[in-house]
Amino acid sequence: MKILHNIILTLVLPISGLYAADNFTTKSLLCSTKNFPVKGGFDFLESNNLVKYNILWDHVEKVEFVSISYHCYIEVNNEIAISSKSRINGCGEYTSFIDINNLTYKIPIEQKMLTAECDYFNGDLLKKIKSSIHKKAIN
């Protein structure tokens, strides 16, 4: 599945820059999974540039923390393709996707697809995500 997405993006991205839309600029998405009511989200900063927030687990300290990373994005057909790197680092491959119609975030890995359900969010996204993490260490 990841290979198919990469093949499509390799064929489409060289010309898609001409057709990139700004439909998500200044919007935010808050995402959840079956096990986590708040798992992370996206702030679309400007055309083709976003911030990705993800609640992760620190195995050493045994606490959750918010990972913040910057990525390129582009709208292709009915998906937002998200790069592995920031614009400053050359964007890299487009390795995860948001379905524009239902706002499902998808990460194809090996033989399966990780997903999260997202919704539009108005407000301070980082503050909302930080308030959702467990503050105490879990033994």
Image (tube, helix red, strand yellow):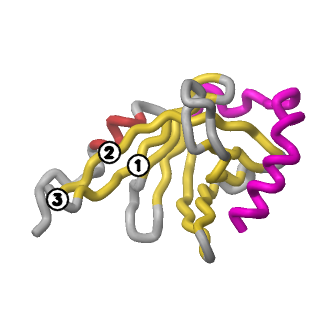
Magenta segment boundaries in residue numbering: 1-27
- Location of the C terminus (image quadrant): bottom left
As for residue 25 lying within the magenta part, the answer is yes
* Disc 3 crowd, CA 10 A, few/some/many (<14, 14-19, 20+): few
| Residue drawn 43% across the image and 49% down it | 40
| Residue drawn 74% across the image and 63% down it | 3
| Residue drawn 47% across the image and 64% down it | 33
Q: Could you tell me the amino acid type at mark 3?
A: Val
Are discs 2 and 1 less than 8 Å apart at CB? Answer: yes
Instruction: Give the residue number, with chain letter if any, for mark 2.
Output: 66
Secondary structure, mark 3, is loop
* CA gap, disc 2 and disc 1: 6 Å
What label does residue 54 carry, if any?
A: 1
Residue 127 sits in which quadrant? top left
Instruction: Give the residue number, with chain letter if any, for mark 3.
Output: 60
Q: Position of residue 86 (x, y in %)?
A: 55, 32
Q: Is residue 128 left or right of residue 107?
A: left
Q: Position of residue 63 (x, y in %)?
A: 19, 56
